[in-house]
Amino acid sequence: MDVDEDRLVDAFFAGAIDGAEFPHASHVRVCWALSRRYSADRAYRLLVDGIRDIARRAGRPGVYHETITRAWFELIASADRLEDWPDLFDKSLITRYYSPARLAAGREKWLAPDLHPLRLPPPPATSTPTASSVLRRIPVAVAVLTTHAAGAVHATTTSSLARVSDEPMLVSVCLRNGSRTLGLVRQAGRFALSILAADQDSLARQFSDPDRPGGAAQFAGTAHQMSEFGPTMTEAAAWLGCTVHAIHECGDHHIVVGEIAHATSSDRRPLVRHDGAYH
């Protein structure tokens, strides 16, 4: 285990990770590390307790899924080296073992898979396109959303910006349930959007990196300026300053609707995300 994985596991034990900071890749590494430190039963209980704690602190204890958690544990723990099994870092891998109906029935109790036994190597991916793969084919603009309140500041990359209304002028973005960004947007009641230019893909990656520092440190070395709505990225294609109009819970995200109070643009071509890549 490398130093970063040690720190990740220590933060997991300390309850210092929130849902937004525990993406699937981190889940895989924590799970694998626990399976190497402890017996299978002990490692699994520690994993469950940690995940339940993250969900509880996010105010969503009901999102815990018994079958998904155990299935991933069994797959990950069976790998001698994570580097040999890149498919484990693909969150959709579980759908090669379980049908949607089986997963839906297994939230509160363990159910064995109905498509393929839980073992590596995984079964081949189906060639039938999923709704998720189809949506990835739709090009979308990429923005950095920022906000600040009570001395705290945070930023995150979003590719969910949408125009909602002309009167009043409203836009929407989607923020993951329990995320630090969502909590701070609620507190601040406003946020800024920097719609990135085509040559700013490095910023998109920077502010979507789960290992980036928190607070003002995440802006170190990044050309930006402060506005009343939050920091804005220099040389972006466009900028929006919004006040929160409404927030709606929807699935695993919240839809944040903002009323535009300030808007300006440059002549730079915007960055687009299409099929998992920036263009």
Image: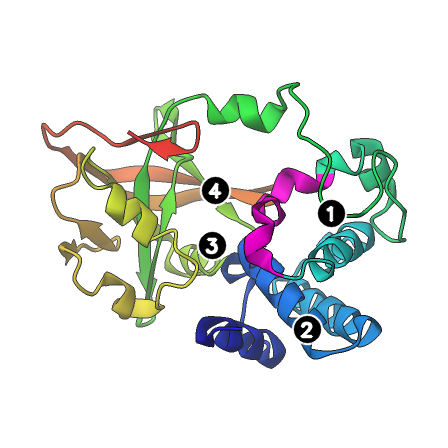
Q: Closer to us: mark 4 or mark 2?
A: 2
The x and y percentages for residue 86 are: 56, 47
Kind of residue at disc 3: Leu
Magenta stretch?
81-94
Do the residues bearing badges 4 and 2 touch, measured as CB atoms within 8 Å? no
Main SS category, magenta section: helix
- Which of labels 3 and 4 is toward the front? 3
Q: What crowding class fits label 3: few (fewer than 14 Cα within 10 Å), some (14-19), or many (20 or more)?
A: many
Horizontal arrangement in the rendering, residue 88 relative to residue 121 (left or right): left
Q: Residue at x 43, y 59 (%)?
A: 210
- Dot 4: within a 10 Å radius of its alpha carbon, few (fewer than 14), some, or many (20 or more) residues? some
Report, in whole angstroms, how far the alpha carbon at label 4 lies from the one at label 2: 45 Å
> In the rendered structure, which amino acid carries the disc numbered 1?
Leu
Residue that mark 4 sits on = 246
Disc nearest the viewer among 1 and 3: 1
Q: Which residue is mark 3?
A: 182
- Alpha carbon separation for disc pair 4 and 1: 45 Å
